[in-house]
Amino acid sequence: MTGNKGKKPRGLAGFAPGEQAGLSVILGAAAPLRLDCGAELGPFTVAYQTYGALNAAKSNAVLVCHALTGDHFCAGDNPFTGKAGWWDLMVGPGKPLDTDRYFVICPNVLGSCYGTTGPRDINPATGEPWGLAFPVITIRDMVRAQAMLLDHLGIADLFCVIGGSMGGMQVLEWVVNYPERVFSAIPIAATSKHSAQNIAFHEVGRQAVMADPNWHGGAYFRHNVTPHAGLAVARMAAHITYMSEAGLTRRFGRALQDRDAFTYGFDADFEVESYLRHQGITFVDRFDANCYLYITRAMDYFDLAADYGGVLAKAFARARARFCVMSFTSDWLYPTAESRAIVHALNAVAAPVSFVEIESDKGHDSFLLDVPEMFAILRGFLDSAARQRGL
Amino acid sequence: MTGNKGKKPRGLAGFAPGEQAGLSVILGAAAPLRLDCGAELGPFTVAYQTYGALNAAKSNAVLVCHALTGDHFCAGDNPFTGKAGWWDLMVGPGKPLDTDRYFVICPNVLGSCYGTTGPRDINPATGEPWGLAFPVITIRDMVRAQAMLLDHLGIADLFCVIGGSMGGMQVLEWVVNYPERVFSAIPIAATSKHSAQNIAFHEVGRQAVMADPNWHGGAYFRHNVTPHAGLAVARMAAHITYMSEAGLTRRFGRALQDRDAFTYGFDADFEVESYLRHQGITFVDRFDANCYLYITRAMDYFDLAADYGGVLAKAFARARARFCVMSFTSDWLYPTAESRAIVHALNAVAAPVSFVEIESDKGHDSFLLDVPEMFAILRGFLDSAARQRGL
């Protein structure tokens, strides 16, 4: 792993609204982006990073889609966290997404707080952050913005679009809405729609944020505060869903934190309590509360089959990509059954699809972690697709 | 189901601290209760209800142990909720816990807010509610207080001790600490220890309460406020763990709440959001925030084998009861594996034990619901135990 050795992370506060880290482009100035909610957005900024080089035929582009709280620094140094990029194990020279071979593009999603326009950024109509005046966006809107980025970069089609979790949802929207632009597609630990339980957990998080008096109806920027306590609780609840019961037991069990006996109080007696509190506290330094509301909402609204009479296979009818669908045994957020439903729908339209369920006790977050089987399978699938593509 | 038709529930606010609903007794005046934390408590109040009549031989007493937010009104009218008691399907004439046959005693647990002494009650040393000055209690402490209640009632031993969830934890403490006083024991949807994931979810709830500025370090009673927003979030998170993914999908799926389309906002667009918000809002009318901290802490501290070198079978070495252990297929809070571990430990000491895993998609809360198979099995087990007991 690389990383910013000795560099202090700038966190989110280290970047003013509208300040860019990495590459960025202003899009939608001539023709705005028409969102699912009916509003039009433009001009707007898309922040992104690229890794490797585009070949002369422009046939080696890989789009990496990030998850809920991710950013465009999937590899190398990440200025927000001061650590290596969130998929540094996956993206780089000689890695599964081999940047000696592929041109990797990783955009920050619409609605996020890392450079692509979202609620934290300045609303030109008011000169202050959008806050809740920002239009509610969908996963499809995120993908529309990405397609505009590709147009700007002069890339007609993608060798591959890949992502885990919410990144996988974007992959699915790509193959449905831009079938002619996707040669291969890899949705990992994903789902074709948010379940009632998925929505319920997100709603708990949103209510935690909105219950914080510092939230001020989304206008905390006017009060020089942030709803950090509520956002930390939201993150703690979410974080449990990213791990598995077995993984928590293996890692923490009932071990006590720096003590030999219960304190009979409300300190973090248990290691798992201390760990969770740390997850909550550090999260508020790197994410914006309103952005959390918007992106969780986009995920809850996600239902790929909704415009196709609820029949997922119909959504995939025009898809041309070859697919590698991947899930993890201990992922209870988007369990293997969700991936299987995607595979069955792809089978129904005779799409070429590989499906692998990987044994892991690391839960949903497995897609971000060092899971050698995942890397090996991706290498194999990408090699095969590259041969088919003539790369 | 019976119920207070037309009666307005008094809620928790309808009862002043120390005011009793139902029966109550002051215990520990002569000799205080020595708690696991080392503190002594006494005198203290135990609120309880009884149903049916004690026979002349005093051999037909059944102790019903309630769960986290339960109370002593397991049957008939419940003055706190204005509804039928929480186990009205189970307790009454002709019901599985047949009050024509058994003398049912249901005490409110130590640390609760329904009459038995807890953080909401008046600390005689200060004249104001205990708040965080209340000693941290354990499940074993709850059971010690129950044993003192039985002494007061002149009941040497119990025909049966039964309870679900935290009630099941009390059942297990009974057979381990008072083996000579328990003839039969029925832990339902229980566990012998809280897992890292169990602790994690409780910690999220506690942090939600403690993040609410109205909590005031537990001294909200001095400010004439309650941390209702934080407590509602805590309840929402907990409530998800009481249901199953399949149950949520069956009941709510992605159905919208009183609308045909997304509002593209942060209202409760989905039924499941509206349902969860309702669960949170109504909970704060019937439960005290500090009590929630204390009782979740007691559950997190629960580890039956801890005093026996971590070997559960050793904890059961002196148990004399016949057991009926019950779990539910979709309970992911205390999954069947937890009940199986209890059964295996009982097998290891050759204790008589029946074990049933009941098919249900209603999750952990199945033990509170109309699950005919559960009732049928309990009838059979209790009939058989009653014959052995000569009832």
Image (cartoon, coloured by chain):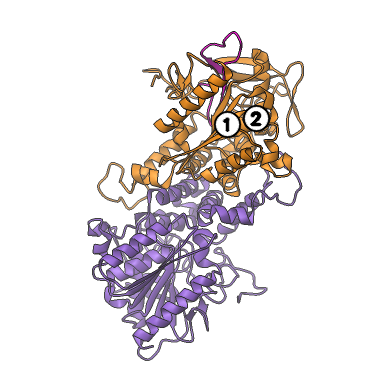
Chain colours: A orange, B purple
Amino acid type of the residue that numbered disc 2 sits on in the rendered structure:
Val
Residue B59 seen from this side? no
Question: Considering the image in quadrants, where does the C terminus of chain A appear?
Answer: top right
Label 1 sits on what residue type?
Phe
Other-residue count near label 2 (Cα within 10 Å), few / some / many at <14 / 14–19 / ≥20: many
Q: Where is residue B323 in the image (x, y as percent from the top left)?
A: 35, 72
Q: Name the residue under label 1.
A: A323
Decide whether the magenta segment is chiefly helix, strand or loop: loop
Residues in magenta, as a range: A49-73
Percent of width and height locating residue A152: 67, 14
Q: What residue is drawn where x is 69% and y is 44%?
A: A311
Q: Is mark 2 on a helix, strand or loop?
A: helix
The structure residue drawn at horizontal position 60% and vertical position 46%, both measured from the top left corner, is A195
Comparing labels 1 and 2, the label whose residue is closer to the camera? 1
- Residue A31, given in percent of the width and then of the height, sits at 77, 19
Q: Is residue B324 left or right of residue B275?
A: left
Work out whether disc 1 and disc 2 sit on a shared chain.
yes
| Labels 1 and 2: the sequence-earlier one | 2
* Alpha carbons under labels 1 and 2: distance apart: 10 Å
Residue B29 image position (x, y, % from top left)? 32, 73
Q: In which quarter of the image is residue B176?
A: bottom left
